[in-house]
Each structure stands twice: as structure tokens, then as C-alpha cells.
Image (tube, rainbow, N blue to C red):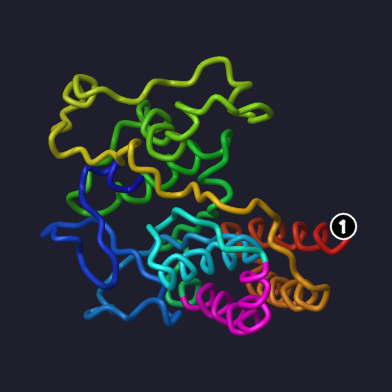
Amino acid sequence: LIEAITGFSTGDDFGINGAHNIVSIKTHYPSSEGKQMAANEVVPRAILLLRHPLSAFPSYYNYLYEMENKLENHSTRAPLEAWISWRDANFDKEIENWRRFVEYWMDNYSPINRLVVSYEKITDDIMGAVEATRIAEFLSRSKGVVTCPPELIACVWHKVVKYKENSSSNNEGRRLQEIPEIPAPPTKEELAKYGIDPSQFALSDPTNPNSHRSGPTYTPPYTKQQLKDLLSTLTALLERYREEKSLAPILVGYIDAVEKRGES
């Protein structure tokens, strides 16, 4: 999405994907899955992308399961019994990693130099384009970065994030279907009209899905004690960052979801 909004390539903390001029670097630092970058102290701003631990943990395990079994990335959901075994062995560590991740990025960047985004909102049918607009505005403050025109943001977001639904015939119940008009993705001609070089405008390839796993369908279960521990961690973070208006509402939503899961 960032590539599509800016036209620049992105990288990660293990490499810059062969590009010489990148607009952002993805990292999971301070988790063991990330590493502190050289000259980290000169990175001026950060986008903190959060996902609810109830979903982030099983998604991470699915990735590990694929790697262990030499499966294509983002292709397969782990069996339920495998998930439960890994969950019980790693739950406490993963909660701690998630907490440290939030605290590191919240504490090392001031509100003006930090944008907090939730995965749930950026993928939501209604709020996704709004969040993409926030990201575009934040990125546009960087020297040398010219973002996609505001009137095209919704189109770009829909092409990058919701491409799977364009070709799906089983979307019953999706709020996206209730929207009377969905903007078409920007064409090369539209991009050129706004002074954007179409050859440099990196749109994700809709023919290469990266977030739709096959395999057994289930809601990843947690024990009552695990839900209690997660609730305690989220509540402590909310108390610490209650005045952070970008983060506090996300944490409140996460707490509500844990409480509802515990009631079911």
C-alpha cells in the first residue's frame, strides 16, 4: 500500500529488496523477528502498525508452520492441534514481545513523528480508505515524497487491499457489497494526468495474493487463563498510554474483543 501511495519501493530490516531509494523500512524490532537497523537513531519518524494479538499470534504461527513444512508463504493455515501445541508453548513469550513492541515505538517517537494504524481498520471495508488517507498525509511530510492525489487514495486502497474481493463470487454479508459504488483502480492514464510516472507507480499485483490461506477453518482458541493474561497486558498498556489518542481507542477495542471472547 505504501508503494502504491508514493510510487517508491519499500524495504525491510533484512534488506532493501534491491532498491536504492526506498520510502519506508518494515521491521518487527525489538522482537527477535526484527533487528535494529544501522543508523537507527537517524530514522526520524515511524508508522506503528498493530494487529490484535488474538489474530496476530495465530497468523505468525501459520507463517512458522509454512516455513517448517517448506510451504509457499501465506498459502496454508496450520492444523488446529498444531496451533494449540505452539500456543501453549509460546503464549507468554508472545504477549511479552507484543507489549515490548508497542512500548518501544510509542516511547521512542513523539506523537508528531509517529502514526499509529491498526490492521483491523486498514483492512476494513469502510475505514480502510480513511486510514490509507492518514498514511498518505503522514508520508507526504517526508522530504522528496509526493503521494497519490487524495481523490485517488480510495481507488488505490481498494486495488491493493481488497483485490481478492473483486474476483470473488462469495462475498455475501460483506459490508463492501452494501456500498453502491466502488471506485475503479487508477489507470495509467489517470496517474499520468496527475504527473505520476505510471512506470514508477508500484501497485501490488492482484494476481499474486498474499493474505488468503487455505486449510482447516477455525477460530483459534485460547484458554481462559490466556485470555485473562492478555486482558491484563492490554489494560496495563491502556493505563500507560491513556492520553495517546491515536493508540488508546485501538487498545479499548482490543480489550472489548478479549472480554467478548471470554464470555463466549
Front one among 40 and 75: 75
In this picture, is 200 found above or below 82?
Answer: above
Question: Residue 4 in the image: x percent, y percent?
Answer: 29, 41
Place residue 199 in its image quadrant.
top left
Question: Residue 97 in the image: x percent, y percent?
Answer: 54, 80
Residue type at numbered disc 1: Ser
In this picture, is 156 found above or below 192?
Answer: below
Q: Quadrant of the C terminus?
A: bottom right
Q: Quadrant of the N terminus?
A: top left
The residue that appears at 16% across and 31% down in the rendered structure is 198
Question: Residue 219 in the image: x percent, y percent?
Answer: 70, 56
Task: For label 1, count other residues whose C-alpha is less than 10 Å away and answer few (under 14), some (14-19) or many (20+).
Answer: few
Place residue 98 in its image quadrant.
bottom right
Place residue 142 in its image quadrant.
bottom left
| Chain part drawn in magenta | 81-104
In this picture, is 126 found above or below 48?
Answer: above
Is residue 82 magenta-colored? yes
